[in-house]
Image (cartoon, rainbow, N blue to C red):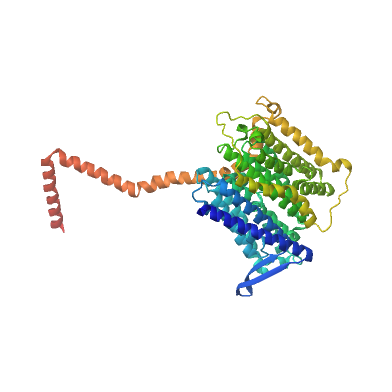
Amino acid sequence: MNKNNFICFNSFFFLFFFMMINFSMMIYFILNNLSLFFEWEIISFNSMSIVMSILLDWMSLLFMMFVSLISSVVIYYSKSYMNSELNLNRFIILVLMFVFSMILLIISPNLISILLGWDGLGLVSYCLVIYYQNLKSYNAGMLTALSNRIGDVMILMVISWMMNYGSWNYIFYMDFMKNDIEMFMISIMIILAAMTKSAQIPFSSWLPAAMAAPTPVSALVHSSTLVTAGVYLLIRFNYLLIDMMFLKILLLLSMLTMFMSGISANYEFDLKKIIALSTLSQLGLMMSILSLGFPDIAFFHLLTHAMFKALLFMCAGVIIHMMNDIQDIRFMGGLSIYIPLTSLCMNISNLSLCGIPFLSGFYSKDLVLEMVSFSNFNLLIFILFYLSTGLTVFYTFRLIMYVMINDYNLMVIYNLYDEDYTMLKSMFILLLMSVVSGSFLSWMIFYYPYMIYLPLNLKLMVIYVSILGMFFGWLISNMKIYSLNKFFMTYNLSNFLCLMWFMPNLSTYGLNYIYMNFSQILFKNIDMGWSEIYSGKGMINIMKNYSIFYNIYQMNNFKIYLFSFVLWIMILFMIFLII
């Protein structure tokens, strides 16, 4: 066994063993209704103590179990996916650092250790996004890192605000500080931090850009680690956020994020970007149900989504590998004939994403939508929720038609081969979880079953929009260039919807243009202009011109040169006489 395989197997077994420990502890904690709280005081000054705290309850143990399961499977998958990588050790160590940052964030009831985990996620995600070291990766990495810095600054400000209370353990102040103005400010900052990490509008543009990372990283980032950190933070802080006006704004923004990403995914042709936009849509769903005041359902959907989204990215990785690194779905088609097992995994994870009954996505998504139907909200929220659900089925079926069912489009390179068994083994673990985790978690998380009675049409509303979405997905995958689209959609409107409502442009070029333009003017007029002329370049020019003049003066006539020499001696002699 070579060194690369050794580190892969070790990491896989360690994380899988850690997952089993978390699973058994979580069962024990739920049965006995236990919570463990550890504190280790590192330093104390002026009645202010820096304490390392660990909170172990059923929620943190369950989330850690899911994170360690997905990351162990992803590392096993990377052994085959990244086998041509010379520095596989470095890649695995970066992934492990990423996972440990997330685990630190999960078990922290203390804002200092939350910041360590939060910042660790941001820093390591930057290293992973720029892993392939080209211009596109660097741009995507900078966009990811700088968007996440806003959230880091908000957490730092929360830490400074909480110095007024004498401790950074936020769980002590949850109940009796609800109506305090300082806690109101802290809540707003926490919501803003969560919005940057979970890529809600207006911070959405970094999430599709982060697709420049290797596919195993995308599977990890978009399922259970980086993007879910914001949702998890809000679930932990949910007592502070009840009855806040800002939550209504968050509800609207998360609904718009769902809607925007659903539309953009229907215009996208990059396989990984479609899946990334679907992650953005599901994050909007989690945030919105959290804003409605159901943190347990948001957590439930977070966990079920983690399973099928990791599987979806792994399937995309196998397809990209097989297609000689082509990611454009227009070059695919009919792949279910050539790679049946990967197609099985991909279709089941896609159907789970749509919420097809009795797969894991159905249990959480159906519950979310019924809770929305049950809540006392206006028509806009109701329509946006169901429209976004329909759009999810729409882009999923479009993807299935393009990749699995339509004719094969890449005529030149016909090198489709059967699957890699290392990748398949890891995918089958997640396939099993994508099927059973919904029912398994619904028995485990909720103390009593949610029985929701609604009128028949409202109860069947999810099925109506899903069937409509399937029909439109099939329709749009068969559309040619002379389609209905050009009669009722102008080019500008299509462009607006395709480019995520111009958000990437606004968050990069829009912000940078003024400063870069100003710096270019400064560079041209001062660095390359006045300061050049009046410093080094100007001195050189003067010396050069004088030397050219003297050279001509000396070369042309020897008598003039001698005469000038005598003249200078006479002038100097006269000066001495005057003095």
Looking at the image, residue 221 sits to the left or right of residue 541; the answer is: right
Q: Which of the two residues, 241 or 275, is positioned nearer the viewer here?
A: 275
Question: Which quadrant of the figure contains the C terminus?
Answer: bottom left
Looking at the image, residue 481 sits to the left or right of residue 213; the answer is: right
The extreme front residue here reads: 1
Tell me how many marks there are.
0
- Tell me the quarter of the picture where residue 184 sits: bottom right
Q: Which of the two residues, 266 or 355, is positioned nearer the viewer here?
A: 355
Measuring from the top left, give residue 303's x and y in whole percent: 71, 52
**Which residue lies at the image location 33% right of the left edge and 46% below the top edge?**
537
Measuring from the top left, give residue 15's x and y in whole percent: 62, 58
Measuring from the top left, give residue 85's x and y in whole percent: 51, 47
Q: Is residue 214 above or below residue 31?
A: above
Q: Which of the two residues, 420 or 147, is positioned nearer the viewer here?
A: 420
- Tell me the quarter of the picture where residue 341 sits: top right
Q: Is residue 474 above or below residue 577?
A: above
Please say whether residue 574 is visible from this viewpoint: yes
The extreme top residue here reads: 482
Measuring from the top left, give residue 373's x and y in whole percent: 83, 46
Looking at the image, residue 493 sits to the left or right of residue 532; the answer is: right
**Which residue lies at the image location 70% right of the left edge and 63% below the top edge?**
182
